[in-house]
Amino acid sequence: MILRYAASVAEQSVKIDADAEVRGLLLSLYAMGGSASALDRLDDHRRSVCSQAWLALGAASPSGREKVLSEWRAELARPWPEGLERLHPSWIVAALEGEPAYMVQTVWRALPDPVRVMVQTMPALANIVLQSAGQASSWAAANTPEVLRLAFGWLAPLCESTCGPNAEGLSALALDDLLSEVTRRGARAVGQSLSGAAQGLRARAMAAAGEPWAQVIGEVSALGLSDPDRKIALGHANTRLPDSARTPGERLLYIGLSVLKSDLVAEHQGSIYRVAGRLPVAMGKTWLGW
């Protein structure tokens, strides 16, 4: 009984670190009865990631492997990325802007209730939906899953990318809390860049930032910091800011985004995408370079 229980636990714990692209590639390869040699045609990075996932899939028990493959097939059949409701609603608006009225209506009618509730209060989306009212297309209605994939497929990295614990925690925050945390990181970077600086210079930076960020800058700037770390912080503090960043808080926010981008890229290749999806679309696109 103990051995059967251990085997059951092992099967339940099968987890393969693979993003949507890798899952799609491996599912196709498995369906065709291919071998790992087919992965040799991929570039170095994809081949490495796919090979590791393929080996993990092969090492799983038959029932554990079938469980993973069933989950991947269900994902493939889903017409929108899993976790669409976790995105900032402005991404949904961006997906529908500029689309024909019949496409907007098809998507709007098919959206799951949680997503519709999340975005329907946004004026931009309300206008799009209102303008498309009464529009219909038999082709769009008959091909609703394909229409949904066209509308939202590009958002999949923001919804489904594997990420590290830092990104996981940040993604769980409400927008105001997330922006506050990023701004705090910006204030810390400014404080670190002033480590060892004259008291007068530190005081001017604190006065320019205002509370509550002045206190963060003051506390951090009073701490000792190595020259290499101070230079890194100085680089973040001098990051190029958009013209829209006019207030001290907005400037610290974009400095914090510079810091956070470095941290997330170092943590996991998917981390930055998951956090970007929680930001307003204009900010998130600029941050990602989209």
Image: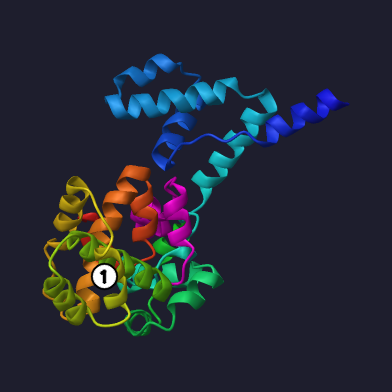
Is residue 27 covered in magenta?
no
Q: Find residue 275 and report its image quarter.
A: bottom left
Magenta segment, prevailing SS (helix, strand or loop): helix
Q: Residue at x 15, y 80 (%)?
A: 246
Is residue 159 covered in magenta?
yes
In the displayed structure, does residue 122 sit left or right of residue 97? right
In the displayed structure, does residue 113 sit left or right of residue 267? right
Q: What color scheme is it?
A: rainbow
Q: Residues within 10 Å of mark 1 (few under 14, many from 20)?
A: many
Q: Position of residue 126 (x, y in %)?
A: 37, 83
In the picture shown, does residue 99 fall above or below 169? below
Quadrant assignment for the N terminus: top right
Instruction: Report the span colored magenta.
Output: 146-174
Q: Which residue is mark 1?
A: 217
Q: Position of residue 37 (x, y in %)?
A: 39, 14
Specify whether residue 19 is in view.
Answer: yes
Q: Position of residue 76 (x, y in %)?
A: 49, 44
Question: Could you tell me the amino acid type at mark 1?
Answer: Ile
**For this rendering, which residue is in front, 181 or 140?**
181
Q: Residue at x 69, y 28 (%)?
A: 63
Q: Secondary structure at mark 1?
A: helix
In the displayed structure, does residue 118 sit left or right of residue 267? right
Q: Position of residue 30 (x, y in %)?
A: 51, 25
Q: How many numbered callouts?
A: 1
